[in-house]
Amino acid sequence: MKTYARHPIAFVRGKGCYLWDAEGKKYLDFLAGIAVNGLGHSHPVITAAVAEQAAKLIHTSNLFYNSSQAELAALLCKHSFADKVFFCNSGAEANEAAVKLARIYQKGKKGPDCFEILTMEKSFHGRTLGMIAATGQDKVKKGFEPMPEGFRHLPYNNLPALAAAMSDQTCAVLLEPVQGEGGVNYPGSGYLQGVRELCRKHGALLIYDEVQCGMGRTGKLFAYEHSGVAPDIMTLAKSLGAGLPIGACLATDEIAAAFQPGSHASTFGGNFLVCEAAKAFLKVLLEGGTLSHVVKNGAYLVEQLRGLQKKHLFVKEVRGSGLMVGVELEILAKPLVERALEEGLIINAPQEKVLRLVPPLIVGYKEIDQAIDILDDVFGEVSGRGPA
Ligand code: PLP
């Protein structure tokens, strides 16, 4: 079905930060499967984990215990606020689980009318019917009305608006600590602390969607660690499986206990294969110095982009922490994405005037310099400013 506006390119092979198309042309991948391939392509640790597990056992069902799932859950809990994990297959599903968990918990605690979830304008939470209702962008809802009830959108980074919207009937606040699809928007200082305080005051749950910004992307394992404000529930997907499809909904013991056998389920959720890939990825992230590499190389990428900003005046702002970087423009981004692609650099535009760079977390200075050279040329065609 025509659900995607695809580029006329088919990739056949990948290694590290590079991809090759069917004609043999080489591309530098600064999109990484849309913030998925944390260790790039064909990383030997992931390849070995998947191959070994595939030869042993891929799937049973969630009617039986699964040691790979238990070990992955233990690792995620050890390194986060959470005590329990539910596994599914995607970001949208992880958010569905989070919303269902928040609702069933609050119904037990505060009664049947406590179901409203407040989410943010420009947010993105997935494409299921529930998650297009949760998403604060009209374009994803258009044509699919009526929307499921119980979601209201508020401006991001705006505590007075949130304070005015909250009541003791608010079930939860759901937000991305860093908005991805909305244009790579970072929280202002004190924002998450303020949201937490309002949730505490009204007995509402705080849910973080870290599907895009989690798993090392911003230089910490989870983006919320920058603020020190932990949520009650958090969702992960995208890079969690280093390219394999897995999602997760994490929660504290008290909240997780609201789910009982029969409350929620997923046939494939957390099968052996995807859990072994995620375990292998997490171990590299935690043990291999990858996070400090992300901080250092992310700062270098942002610095280089700010250099381009000085030269090409249509570049309005460069936003980034770690390797989650947005470049806001005064012109449309799409033609630049197309030109960069022709020159062998893969990036994308999550909003009309924003470029997004989310390279593999293993990206080095050499690849960053190469990407900057291509962007300088492409920007120069528009700004009329050639090499300095
Ligand atoms: N949440 C966030 C923050 C996302 O960026 C995305 C996808 O871009 C999703 C949820 C949906 O994830 P999926 O496409 O795996 O359902």
Image (cartoon, helix red, strand yellow):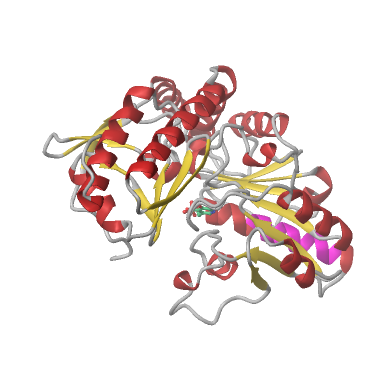
Q: Name the spot of residue 366 as percent of width and height, x first.
A: 32, 23
Inspect this view and state whether residue 144 appears. Answer: yes
**Position of 16 relative to 330 (above/below):** above
Q: Name the spot of residue 73 as percent of width and height, x first.
A: 66, 34
Q: Residue furthest left?
A: 23
Per the rendered image, the range of residues in magenta is 97-108
Left or right of residue 69, residue 112 in this image:
right
Residue 201 lies in what quarter of the image? bottom right
Assess whether residue 107 is covered by the magenta stretch. yes
Q: Name the spot of residue 162 as percent of width and height, x first.
A: 74, 66
Residue 152 lies in what quarter of the image? bottom right
Instruction: Please state which of residues 340 and 225 is positioned toward the viewer in this rendering.
Output: 340
Q: Name the spot of residue 91 as percent of width and height, x first.
A: 53, 51
Residue 98 lies in what quarter of the image? bottom right
Assess whether residue 118 is covered by the magenta stretch. no
Residue at 83 percent of width and 70 percent of height: 167
**Quadrant of the frame with the N terminus:** bottom left
Left or right of residue 193, residue 235 in this image:
left
Residue at 72 percent of width and 29 percent of height: 78
**Position of 367 relative to 167 (above/below):** above
Q: Residue furthest bottom?
A: 146
Instruction: Please state which of residues 6 and 88 is positioned toward the viewer in this rendering.
Output: 6
